[in-house]
Image (cartoon, rainbow, N blue to C red):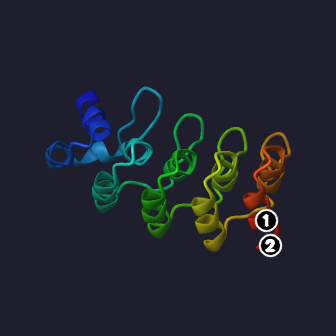
Amino acid sequence: MDDFFDHIRKGDLNDVKLLLSHNPELVRARDPRGSTPLLLAAYYDQGEIVDLLLENGADVNEQDASGNSALMGVCFKGFEGVAYKLIAAGANVDARNSMGASCLIFAITFNRENIAKMLIEHGADPEARDARGHTALDHARMQGLQSLVNLLENR
């Protein structure tokens, strides 16, 4: 199984296809940190592998041991194309991790304006609060990210 996760990280699409064809249950596997194949593919910006995993029944809303979803990972990393794929596949734009952070809070915290816009357009709740009681707008203000403050205030 470690090989499967290594092939995902490296973007070895043909090897991932081959391993899945021999063992379709790999789509639901977890690594030692609780990450699923879809979470890793999204986190490493492996769009074709994301497509393959979704086509093979990967749960777009599955979360790792910390409560992070694939969409949260791309909001952190800034991978707009994969974010779009996940949202189109039904990813929960309001999912929260163990610290209460939402996808929008991740996008704002890491200054991912285009992803923040995409999340808002798809119904993300800008009033969601993390475990410390902060909203996405609070995070934008604390970091002095004026364009994101404007985005959230003028939505």
Give the x, y percent position of residue 87. Answer: 50, 65
Whether residue 69 sits left or right of residue 2 in the image: it is right
> Helix or strand or loop: what does disc 1 sit on?
helix
Relative to 138, 122 lies left or right: left
Q: Nearer the viewer, residue 27 or 72?
A: 72
Relative to 150, residue 76 above or below: above
Is 28 above or below relative to 122? Answer: above
Tags 2 and 1 in contact by the CB under 8 Å rule? Answer: yes
* Residue found 15% across the figure and 49% down from its top: 21
Which residue has dot 1 on it?
Answer: 150
* Residue 87 falls left or right of residue 119: left
| Residue drawn 26% across the image and 31% down it | 1
Answer left or right for 121 relative to 21.
right
Residue 105 lies, in percent from the top left, at: 70, 51
Give the residue number, with chain letter if any, for mark 2. 154
**What residue appears at the point 63 percent right and 73 percent down from the top-left corner?**
121
